Amino acid sequence: MNFEKGTVQSLNVHVLPTNRFKTFTITLFAGTQLQEETVTSTALIPYVLRRGTANKPETIALREQLDELYGAGFGFNITKRGNTQFVQFRMDVINDRFVKSEVSLLSEAIKYIGQMVTHPLVENGQFRPAYVDAEKQTLQKQLESVINDKIRYASERCMEEMCANEPYRLNAAGRLEDLPHVDARTLFERYQQWLSEAQLDIYVVGDTTLEEVVGYIEQYFTLPDRSPKPYERADVQHNVEEVKTVVEQLDVNQGKLNLGLRMNTGYASPNYAAALVYNGILGGYPHSKLFVNVREKESLAYYCASRLDGHKGILSIQSGIEFANYEKALNIIEQQISEMKAGNISDVELSQTIAMLSNSLREMFDSANDMLGFDFNNRYANTNRTIEQLLTEVQAISISDVQTVAQQVELDTIYFLRDRQGV
């Protein structure tokens, strides 16, 4: 899997020529610093951009264009990696070879994204106010919906408390309290700043070449004089001086016990493969220690699992429990973390985890999105590890390697969401 690399006006181009897929997959990553002052306006930008461009100011015409491209799929995500907020535009369009099209569908797809991002609808030096007002309401509803999803709410609150003095505390989708202060003019000003400062990386996977893609980008992207700011990557090394315990009370019927741990190992670390195996054995799969001991043997949790964020060096544990089981569930979870540090890992736990991770890595070759995502993670972490290399590293991990990583892990924050009946 070798992406060919190029640059157009400080926009980084990554192309994987392959005839394995019947479609072209196109993704544009726009990354800027995750910070309180701009997180909400940045999150709102793609909502407004999708409403209209200079050439197609009406939303319905823009959407009909996708139908004309044989039902091309378009969407966007707003995410965070480390200290960076990403707006990610995605598009899938069928390869021209499988339809009778008079124009290049790849060309039209890149044109669609290029015009949306660099030729937005601008009226009187600002975005169309009606679009901004409507999309503010859309974003507001999405932010308000988090409180109704208690699993997600508890996860975000745990990270917010754990990283209280770090950019990572911020929700990449923004903050409700900022929305009333955003209007069509201030949002357009932020858009101009965002387009000037963002690191831009466009990926194309399909039956094409770097030369062809570069030609389309030169034709359809018109970028201003840019000064992209280099990524400010998060420091994954963090000494915990005191474990923080936070109890929050809401009208809930089930407790959410979340733990945040500092791995002190990140994506670019030589120990990253061992960290993946660590997470798998602790709580990544149905055979993992947390699931078996907390949920199955003790019946203390409706769910209990862990997730690793390699770019931040954080491992989070999520569980749903009865309020009365807080102490017992916490003790057993902490016991599993101690077992990992002691190297009390069975051969079966190790082999099953390696097998599951290996399958996941092999499956990446069947997904254009997974392949480009893996390459972009390398770019963001400033590494050049291939899927094949990571697969080899994972399969060579021993119990001793996992224990080495485990001994660097520190519990940072305990977050418990419970009812209002008292603690």
Image (cartoon, helix red, strand yellow):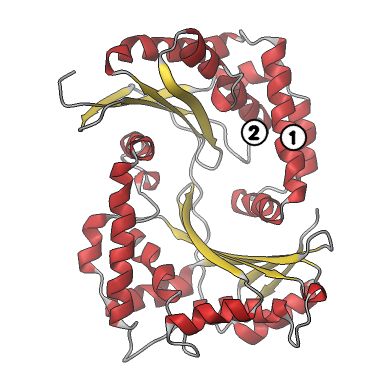
First in sequence: mark 1 or mark 2?
2
Residue under label 1, please give it: 359
Task: Find residue 272 and name its label.
Answer: 2
Query: Amino acid under label 2?
Result: Tyr
Q: Is residue 397 visible?
A: yes
Query: Tag 1, which secondary structure?
Result: helix
Give the quarter of the image for residue 208. Answer: bottom right
Query: Amino acid under label 1?
Result: Asn
Residue in the image at 47% along x and 70% along y: 197
Q: Is residue 87 visible?
A: no
Whether 47 is drawn above or below 423: the answer is: below
Q: Is 279 positioned to the left or the right of 121 in the image?
A: right
**Quadrant where the image shows the C terminus:** top left
Q: Is 186 positioned to the left or the right of 173 in the image?
A: left
Query: Tag 2, which secondary structure?
Result: helix
Q: Badge 2: how crowded within 10 Å, few (<14), some, or many (20+)?
A: some
Find residue 138 and report its horizontal and vertical position in percent.
33, 64
Question: Is mark 1 in CB contact (under 8 Å) with mark 2?
Answer: no
Residue in the image at 36% along x and 73% along y: 190
- Using the image as rendered, state which of residue 369 and residue 85 is in the foreground: 369
Whether 77 is drawn above or below 418: the answer is: below
Measured Cα–Cα span from mark 1 to mark 2? 17 Å
Residue in the image at 30% along x and 43% along y: 148
- Using the image as rendered, state which of residue 117 and residue 189 is in the foreground: 117
Find residue 382 and report its horizontal and vertical position in percent.
64, 50
Residue in the image at 59% along x and 82% along y: 221
